[in-house]
């Protein structure tokens, strides 16, 4: 399932609410939009490893354990 960008909170809102870095906020939005790690890496022009590292940072800062929980928290945010 894909979520439209207009339905997602802004990067600035995610940064303010959860203390994410700009890059992590971008990754969080892409995860919430339903994109895969590979697609996110391509879109942001970074390595898959970098996306995984940001995803782990996001999980820790949001206090969740899975991508599904990231999606839930971002969309409720």
Image (spheres, rainbow, N blue to C red):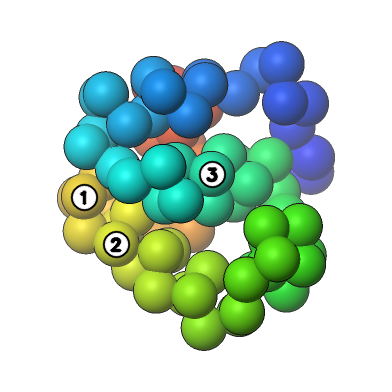
* 3 vs 1, front mark: 3
Secondary structure found at label 2: helix
Q: CA distance from mark 2 to mark 1?
A: 6 Å
Badge 2 crowding class, 10 Å Cα cut-off, few under 14, some 14 to 19, many 20 or more, is: some
Q: Would you name the residue on which mark 1 appears? A: 61
Q: Would you name the residue on which mark 3 appears? A: 26
Q: Position of residue 38 (x, y in %)?
A: 73, 73
Q: Is residue 1 above or below residue 55?
A: above
Residue found at x 67% / y 58%: 44
Query: Does residue 65 appear left or right of residue 23 in this picture?
Result: left
Q: Earlier along the polypeptide chain: callout 3 or callout 1?
A: 3
Quadrant the N terminus occupies: top right
Q: CA distance from mark 2 to mark 3?
A: 12 Å
State which quadrant residue 16 falls in. top left
Residue found at x 34% / y 68%: 56
Q: Would you name the residue on which mark 2 appears? A: 57
Q: Is residue 21 visible?
A: yes
């Amino acid at each position: 399932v894909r979520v439209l960008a207009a339905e997602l909170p802004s990067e600035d809102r995610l940064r303010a609410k959860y203390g994410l870095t700009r890059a992590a906020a971008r990754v969080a939005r892409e995860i919430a939009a339903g994109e895969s790690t590979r697609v996110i890496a391509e879109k942001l022009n970074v390595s898959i490893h970098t996306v995984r590292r940001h995803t782990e940072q996001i999980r820790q800062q949001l206090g969740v354990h899975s991508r599904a929980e990231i999606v839930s928290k971002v969309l409720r945010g």
